[in-house]
Amino acid sequence: MKPAPFAYAKARSLEETVALLGEHGDGAKLLAGGQSLIATLNMRLSAPSLLIDINGLRDLAGISQRDGMVQIGALTRHAEVERSEVAAKHAPLIAQAMPHIGHPAIRNRGTFGGSVAFADPAAELPACVLALGGELDITGAKGKRSVKADAFFKGLFETALGPQDVLTAIRVPAATAHSRFGFAELARRHGDYALVGLAASARADGKGLADVRLAYFGVDSTALRARKAEAALAAGSLDKAVEALDGDLDPPDDLQGSSKLKKHLAGVLLRRVAAQLSEARS
């Protein structure tokens, strides 16, 4: 199929982007990497009257680390994050997840902010940002604001972004010597969306773990934290943490598998990721 007709505008500034969004309302869509948008256009799941191309806004790209935070510009390509020494050293959970995102051709064009803003429930990056307790910088008609990851993801393809908002950057705490991370997913083929996935972070506390954050993806309408399992794992019981998933997760039956299967796989991944969290960083 081919997309429905639409107008095209290449934004020259962030301010112009916000103004165009305000002028055209729900009829406008932002074009960044386009790896999700183009597919929905071609299937006519999206039919905007205007595409606003923001690829020229280079201030929205790049990776940096300062003041204990790693900042990733919304327009940073997946491939750039994947190759980044800053990400590898200071945001290893994100670096670990990057090779699981689609295939190289997709990572060459897709953007970090595009994936987070699209909020596909089976995508890796929303779960990583949630597991790290990240913050999202947004610019809109009323100016700039920051939203915590726990408040950003609202539901199926729904976020805290308003119709005139632009996600500009994602910030996560930089790793320390006491940080622990884990990531695992199960997919039918490499590059497919995960049947079930888990991104996790914690802080080493003596022989145990504290500040445990377990963010699952592929099991609900959005990435979500398994809070009962977090508490059980922080208390030192992996078996109880796996049992607690029964109260944390209620995955739907779908073409990928039954709810029972997904809960079982969630427990398998928790055991794998818990082993990663127990390892000291080199």
Image (cartoon, rainbow, N blue to C red):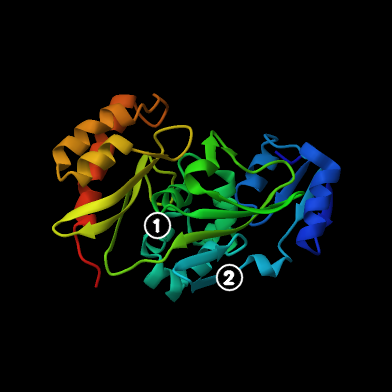
Percent across and percent down for residue 92 are: 37, 65
**Residue at left offset 48%, top offset 57%:** 103
Q: Answer whether residue 176 is visible to the viewer in this image.
A: yes
What amino acid type is highlighted by mark number 1? Ala
The secondary element bearing badge 2 is classed as loop
CB atoms at circles 2 and 1 under 8 Å apart? Answer: no
Q: Quadrant of residue 158?
A: top right
Q: Answer whether residue 187 is visible to the viewer in this image.
A: no
What amino acid type is highlighted by mark number 2? Gly
Q: Quadrant of residue 1?
A: top right
Look at the picture and state if 241 lies above or below 77.
above
- The residue where tag 2 is placed is 62
- The residue where tag 1 is placed is 97
In terms of sequence position, does the residue under pointer 2 or pointer 1 come before the other?
A: 2
Percent across and percent down for residue 87 are: 43, 69
Q: Is 171 left, or right, of 40 in this rendering?
A: left
Look at the picture and state if 80 lies above or below 167.
below
Quadrant including the C terminus:
bottom left
Within 10 Å of the Cα at label 1, are there few (<14), some (14-19), or many (20+) other Cα atoms? Answer: some
